[in-house]
Each structure stands twice: as structure tokens, then as C-alpha cells.
Image (cartoon, rainbow, N blue to C red):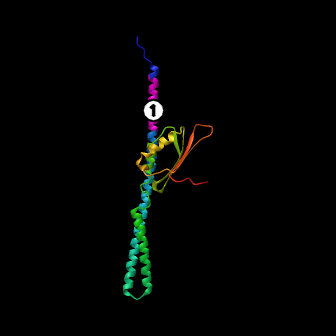
Amino acid sequence: MQQINLLQSGLRSKESRLAANKVMTYIGVFVAVLGVISAFQWWQQYSQQQALLEAKQEKDELLKQIQFVSTEIAAVSDDSEYKNILVTKEQELKNKNLVLSVLSGQKFGNTKGFADQFTGLSRQHVDGLWITQLDIHAGGEKLNLQGSAFSPGHVPDYLQRLGKEPSFNGVEFKTFLMERDEGSSRIDFDIRSTQKEAG
């Protein structure tokens, strides 16, 4: 006589539904985070393009003014007032060209945003460890992480995983603090690529 255990198969289907719901929740959160990051990057790029366009327009206007003044000076070559105006306008043009070259060359550090760092942090998840504060400075070269974990071993494991991410190449941590929360098994940590300021 063969016996069939219907109770266990019912539990299995319920567990698989719960696992599927959990996966869908993670995917939804991940998609939402990527959407926010993409929107921020688009806004940042749009702002830079607008600043570059304004600088080009100002440069063109100054060139027109200089050409006008040069024509007037050619007509009255001994007039020192016009010469002073020309010198002033040429200096303004030089300054505008400098600003334009800085904007064109994108010399303001990281112009790609921090999507790579955020993606790297999300990829290297360690169960039992969570981040409570994240500060990224100097175009991603300086990084401060604060968080908690249920085991002291989770923190070095997490750092080793981050070290495998290309977006964190060259980041050296100079401050590493861990302390146990009184009355619980939780470990709080503070990892910084810069020295922690006193106070």
C-alpha cells in the first residue's frame, strides 16, 4: 500500500510562492533604485550642458563686442579710452575662454555620477550586515561607510567583497572602528578613507 503525504507538498508550494514574492520584491526595489540614480545622472548632465551653452553664448557676445571696439579703434588709433576698453574686453574674453575650457573638459571630478559605486554596494550584499550611512566625496575617491552587523566577521568579509568591485579601485580605508552595542549582539562599524575628525 502506497501512502501520499499531501501536507508536505502543500508546504512546498507555499514556500516556493513566498520565495517568488521575495525575489519580485528585491527586483522591484532594485529597479526603483536604478530609476532614481538614472534620473539624478540625467539632471546632472543636463545642468552641465546648460552651463556650457550659456558660456558659449557669452563668449560669442564678447567676440562681437571686441570686433566692434577694434573697428572703432582702427578709425581713431590714438584714442586711449578705446584702447582701455579693448584691453578690458580682451581680458573678459580670456576669462570666458578659461571657464569654457573648464566646462568643455569637464574638470569637475566625477561627471558620471555615482551609479557604479551604488551598483557595487548593492552587488556585494552580506546577510546580517547593513549600511546606516554612506558618504561619497571627491568624485568617488573618498568613501565613508557606517553600519551594523550581527557578527564581527561580516565586516571584513564585506570589505573583501567591495575590494573586488572596479568602482572601488584605489580607495584606501584609513579609519576602521568596530564596537559592540551594549546589551545586544549587534556590532556597529565606521570605515573611512579619511582620518576621522576629533570631536
**Residue located at (44% from left, 78% from top):** 88
Residue at point 46%, 22% (across, down)? 8
19 relative to 193, above or below: above
Q: Quadrant of the N terminus?
A: top left
Reply above or below: 85 against 140: below
170 or 130: which is nearer to us?
A: 170
**For the residue labelled by badge 1, is the local secondary structure a helix, a strand or a loop?**
helix
Note whether residue 114 is visible: yes
Label total for image: 1
Mark 1 burial class by Cα count in 10 Å: few <14, some 14-19, many 20+: few
Q: Residue furthest top?
A: 1
Where is mark 1, residue-wise? 19
Q: Quadrant of the C terminus?
A: bottom right
Magenta stretch prevailing secondary structure: helix
Q: Position of residue 158 (x, y in %)?
A: 48, 42
Residue plotted at (44% across, 29% down): 16
- Using the rendered image of the protein, determine whether residue 122 is visible from the camera's viewpoint: no
Residue 36 pos. (x, y %): 46, 49
Which residues fall within the magenta stretch?
9-25
Residue 58: horizontal and vertical position, in percent?
42, 70
Q: Amino acid at mark 1?
A: Ala
Task: Find the residue positioned furthest to the right.
Answer: 183
- The x and y percentages for residue 6 are 45, 19
